[in-house]
């Protein structure tokens, strides 16, 4: 009996010592990132379970809390990136109404026009208008450059994040191999900490989920189901970045058309998966960077391009509203298309035989064949777009112009000269046959000046702003590519007007210097004239074009960006709270509590003292027996 007591007490001391050592290790690692609390199990041992032995060291893990932590980590990284970009974008436009803001600069320009309209003979007023116009063009270009700089930053971040994610995947696979091949429970616990820390880091980059395997390894995949790590095998991620992005650089599933980088996962078997094209990454900083680069920032560029285009065309174009006519069998509209230029879209609102209503947009071009134009590049992203070739210039052969329109419209429509109208006046009718459409409305925006040098035409329109790339007239042409794309960066003041400021007033060579017609027209075109702005600008709701003044559109841009930035900051703040809560929950379950460890230490000390006393008593008994 004495020997059994000695063995039991000795085993108890060893087990207690091991547990005290583990408590000490827990306390020492209270501030160590990624360290999870350890416990040491004891098992019965010896004859009749009279003794005790130490079992395996295990980590205290709350699986649900860990899953939530990773989800909130991905969400927090996503909202933080969105908030940073939205705030930077808001800063680019300036404080609404501020002197250096986008709308403030436009307001100074309209005020200068108002001053010139009040005193058209003033050379100082003309100079003020030119200075304000130059400042406005530079302000637009600066904001557009800033947008592209943000896109380039997102491209660079995607490259960095992809490299980081690929390295973490490789590290997780290696740790899987080491864990499976190890038999030391203490070493395994340390490796599991390292693996969890790597997965948590990966969660900040993309949304991932894990599945524990029976051999101790884990499988890592995106929440969309793309496998990234399977035991010791990891996919490698690559990003083919494009450096500095231009306004026309866009994502496409066709590599030949893609102007930005994409993330490709290459599996150990050699299969390649485009993670961006497949939408496999839905959260984390990578998903946010993709959304900013390919969605939010291009939309911001489109807003600036639309503003620049509206500013330019408001001063050179006239909006032709169709005059309804009835030829006895079908309803139609007369449109004066004299001077129609490439990009001067003709919009017909039609209703088909099923009752569905939709816009049909005809886009003229000097090219043959005419370039293909997507609806997203027009004012209405839901319209059906047909491009067609017109004579160069269109006024050279009105009959050929009408024929081109008729060919573009196809069957169901009739095109003829408008009776009693100008040579460029066109009558468009629906034939009225079974299944033919009904024309509900017709309009067009027609450029009234022939070139930037056409300043004495007798019309109030003048090309004050031009396409600075080659100082050409802005008409919205698609010949040689979309003239709209990147126009905000290229917009410039017309050199012909700059070199002769009287063109701001004189409609013709015989015009009086006191004629306020042109400056009054330019002012009204910006402040009261209604224009249609693209649905792709994102300001008119879901895929809806918006109508308003140029000044009002500028104000809408700033208001929308300010609201979006405030919403992003609010969302990020809420997500930070959610992440903090998830971290607290995980720490309470799996982190080290000094108070709890001290309590455990007291209990272990008591057990140690008890075992020591048993050992002392057994030794005394044995000594007594030996002396008998």
Image (cartoon, grey):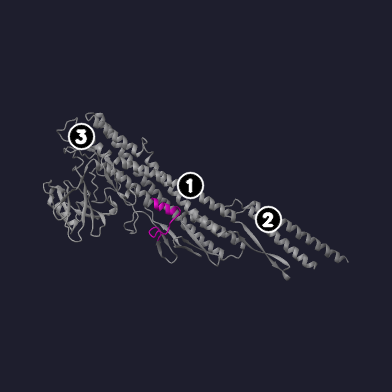
Q: Which of marks 1 and 2 is nearer the N terminus?
A: 1
In three-dimensional space, the C-alpha distance between marks 3 and 2, rounded to whole angstroms, equals: 92 Å
Residue 342 at x, y percent in the picture: 21, 49
Q: Along the horizontal axis of the image, is 283 left or right of 554?
A: right
Please tell me how crowded label 2 is: few (under 14), some (14-19), or many (20+) other residues with Cα within 10 Å.
some
Residue 260 at x, y percent in the picture: 36, 54
> Which structural element holds mark 3?
helix
Taking the view exactly as shown, the residue that stands out farthest to the left is 420
457 above or below 123? below
Q: What stretch is highlighted in magenta?
A: 274-292
Residue 177 at x, y percent in the picture: 53, 64
Which quadrant is home to the N terminus?
Answer: bottom right
437 above or below 86? below
Say which residue appears at 71% left-offset and 61% top-offset: 14
In three-dimensional space, the C-alpha distance between marks 1 and 2, rounded to whole angstroms, equals: 38 Å
| Residue 370 visible in rendering | no
For disc 1, the marked residue is: 573
Please tell me whether mark 1 or mark 2 is closer to you in this view: 1
For disc 3, the marked residue is: 517
For disc 2, the marked residue is: 600
| Residue 496 visible in rendering | yes
207 above or below 396? below
Q: Along the horizontal axis of the image, is 70 left or right of 356?
A: right
Which quadrant is home to the C terminus?
Answer: bottom right
Say which residue appears at 17% left-offset and 37% top-offset: 456
Q: Which of marks 3 and 2 is nearer the N terminus?
A: 3
> Which structural element holds mark 2?
helix
Q: Earlier in the sequence, mark 1 or mark 3?
A: 3
């Amino acid at each position: 009996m004495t020997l059994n007591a000695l063995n039991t007490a000795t085993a108890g001391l060893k087990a207690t010592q091991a547990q005290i050592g583990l408590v000490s290790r827990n306390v020492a690692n209270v501030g160590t990132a990624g360290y999870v609390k350890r416990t040491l199990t004891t098992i019965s041992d010896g004859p009749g379970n009279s003794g005790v032995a130490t079992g395996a060291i295990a980590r205290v893990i709350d699986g649900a809390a860990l899953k939530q932590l990773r989800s909130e980590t991905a969400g927090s990284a996503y909202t933080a990136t969105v908030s940073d970009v939205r705030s930077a974008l808001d800063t680019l436009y300036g404080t609404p109404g501020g002197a250096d803001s986008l709308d403030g600069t436009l307001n100074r320009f309209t005020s200068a026009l108002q001053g010139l309209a009040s005193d058209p003979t003033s050379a100082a007023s003309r100079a003020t208008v030119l200075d304000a116009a130059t400042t406005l063009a530079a302000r637009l270009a600066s904001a557009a450059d800033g947008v592209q700089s943000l896109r380039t930053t997102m491209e660079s971040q995607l490259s960095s994040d992809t490299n980081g994610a690929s390295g973490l995947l490789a590290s997780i696979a290696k740790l899987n191999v080491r864990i499976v091949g190890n038999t030391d429970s203490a070493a395994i616990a340390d490796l599991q900490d390292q693996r969890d820390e790597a997965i948590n880091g990966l969660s900040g980059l993309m949304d991932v989920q894990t599945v524990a395997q029976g051999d101790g390894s884990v499988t890592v995949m995106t929440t969309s189901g793309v496998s990234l790590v399977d035991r010791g095998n990891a996919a490698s991620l690559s990003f083919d970045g494009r450096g500095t992005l231009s306004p026309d650089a866009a994502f496409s599933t066709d590599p030949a058309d893609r102007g930005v980088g994409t993330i490709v996962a290459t599996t150990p078997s050699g299969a390649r998966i485009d993670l961006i094209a497949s939408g496999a990454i839905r959260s984390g900083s990578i998903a946010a960077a993709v959304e900013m680069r390919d969605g939010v920032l291009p939309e911001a560029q489109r807003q600036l391009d639309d503003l620049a285009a509206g500013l330019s065309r408001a001063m050179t174009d006239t909006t032709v509203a169709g005059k309804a006519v009835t030829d006895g069998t079908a309803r139609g509209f007369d449109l004066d298309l004299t001077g129609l230029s490439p990009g001067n879209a003709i919009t017909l609102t039609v209703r088909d035989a099923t009752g569905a209503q939709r816009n049909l947009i005809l886009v003229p071009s000097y090219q043959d064949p005419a370039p293909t134009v997507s609806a997203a590049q027009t004012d209405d992203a839901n319209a059906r777009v047909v491009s067609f070739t017109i004579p160069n210039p269109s006024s050279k052969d009105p009959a050929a112009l009408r024929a081109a329109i008729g060919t573009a419209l196809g069957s169901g429509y009739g095109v003829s000269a408008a009776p009693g109208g100008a040579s460029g006046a066109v009558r468009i009718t629906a034939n009225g046959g079974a299944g033919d459409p009904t024309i509900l409305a017709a309009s067009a925006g027609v450029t009234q000046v022939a070139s930037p040098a056409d300043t004495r035409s007798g019309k109030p329109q003048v090309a004050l702003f031009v396409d600075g790339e080659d100082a050409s007239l802005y008409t919205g042409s698609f010949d040689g590519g979309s003239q709209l794309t990147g126009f905000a960066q290229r917009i410039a003041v017309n050199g012909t007007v700059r070199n002769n400021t009287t063109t701001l007033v004189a409609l013709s060579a015989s015009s009086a210097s006191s004629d306020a017609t042109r400056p009054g027209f330019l002012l009204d075109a910006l402040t009261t004239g209604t224009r249609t702005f693209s649905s792709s600008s994102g300001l008119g709701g879901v895929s809806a074009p918006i109508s308003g003044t140029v000044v009002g559109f500028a104000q809408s841009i700033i208001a929308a960006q300010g609201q979006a930035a405030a919403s992003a900051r609010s969302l990020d703040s809420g997500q930070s709270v959610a992440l903090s809560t998830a971290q607290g929950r995980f720490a309470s379950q799996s982190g080290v509590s000094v108070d709890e460890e001290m309590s455990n230490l007291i209990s272990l000390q008591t057990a140690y003292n008890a075992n020591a006393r048993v050992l002392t008593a057994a030794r005394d008994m044995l000594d007594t027996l030996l002396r008998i």
